[in-house]
Every structure is written in C-alpha cells, then in structure tokens.
Image (cartoon, helix red, strand yellow):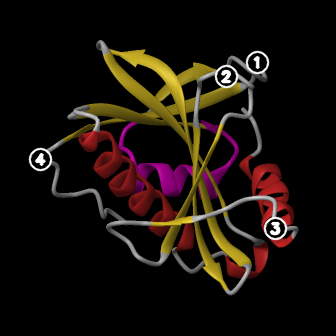
Amino acid sequence: MTDPFEGLVSFQQALLNGEIRLQRGEIHLDVFLHVDYPRGDDVPRFTYVRLDGQEVTAFANMVPAGLVHDLPCFQVGVAVPEVYRGRGYAKGIVAAAIAELRNGLLRNNIRSFYVEAVVSVDNDPSKRVASSTISSTSTEITDEVSGLPALRYLRKIDKGNSDDARG
C-alpha cells in the first residue's frame, strides 16, 4: 500500500510552484483533474482534487491496476489534509472522481470498468470511505507492495450506474 497522503503533499507543492495544469471537471465543476505519466510509460495517473483557492482540500488518484473479469480496473487512493478531515471530503472526492472517470472513459467507448481500494486492516477512516463509496463488502488480502494484511474493496461501474454519487 502506498500512502496517498504523500501524493497529496507533492501535488500541493507542484500546484503552488505552477508545475501542473488543472482541467475543470465536466460533471462536478468544483473538481479539477490532472493527468500525468509518473512511471514514464503509457500508464496514466488521474488525479482529482477539490480546492480552496490554491489549497487542496481533497485528493483522489485513479491508477490503472490491470483487468478484472476482462475489464479495466482502477485503484483509488484518497487523502485529505488533517484540517479538513471529518467533513466527508474523502467520500465526496472519491464519488466525484468515479463519476468524472466514468464520463471520460465513455468518450473512449469504455462502458464498464472496476474501481478498487486496497486499505490497511488498521486504517479505520479509509475503511469507512471505501465501504461507503466502493463496496460495503471487502476481501481480505495481502498487499502486494507492503506485504501487510489489507482489505480489497471492489466495485463494477457501468454506463448506466446512477449511484456514483454515493457517500
């Protein structure tokens, strides 16, 4: 498991330094998107944020994570600065990120995909976010990155899903 908060911190710094450009969301006009290729290959990372001026208040990454049942799967990571926690911002940015990603993928004729969250068994706040925005059920796994016990939350998103604003 990688820590999405580290991504939020580096994203915030890059934003303040003028190193990245943001694109306004098409469904949620208060959400901004940045797409980059951190591994230097053709695998994109989609970062969705909500801002207060130039300050990130909520952050979600969507990274391709292979295929599930022959459909693309995106792993979500979410972080909220401590001062903004406990206000539902994490749930809101995940729901908005799923809706924006679905909208973008539909333009490319990708009508169905999966989103997953891999959460440490000890991270109660992230488990609450994942269970309310991804799936109410989880599967016990061993995280491939850390080797630690984790929970995997998985949800199929279809063109017709009307519940992408969960949470």
**Mark 1 surroundings: few (<14), some (14-19) or many (≥20) residues within 10 A:** few
In terms of sequence position, does the residue under pointer 1 or pointer 4 come before the other?
A: 1
Q: Name the residue beneath numbered marker 3.
A: 18
Q: Residue 147: which numbered mark, if any? A: 1
Question: Which three-letter amino acid code belongs to the residue tagged 1?
Answer: Gly
Q: Is residue 19 above or below residue 155?
A: below
Foreground of the two, 129 or 100: 100
Q: Is residue 132 left or right of residue 4?
A: left
Query: 31 or 118, which is in the foreground?
Result: 31
Q: Are marks 1 and 4 in contact (CB under 8 Å)?
A: no
Residue sitting at x 55%, y 32%: 151
Please state the horizontal and vertical placement of residue 9, each as a whole percent of the image. Answer: 83, 60
Pointer 4 local density, CA inside 10 Å: few below 14, some 14–19, many at least 20: few
Q: What amino acid is labelled 2 in the image? A: Asp
What SS does tag 2 mark? Answer: loop
CA gap, disc 1 and disc 4:
36 Å
Q: Which residue is mark 2?
A: 143
Is-magenta flag for residue 123? yes
Residue closest to the eye, 123 or 58: 58
Q: Local crowd at mark 3 within 10 Å, few (<14), some, or many (≥20)?
A: few
Q: Earlier in the sequence, mark 3 or mark 2?
A: 3
Element type where label 1 sits in the image: loop
The residue drawn where x is 81% and y is 67% is 18
Q: Are marks 1 and 2 in contact (CB under 8 Å)?
A: yes
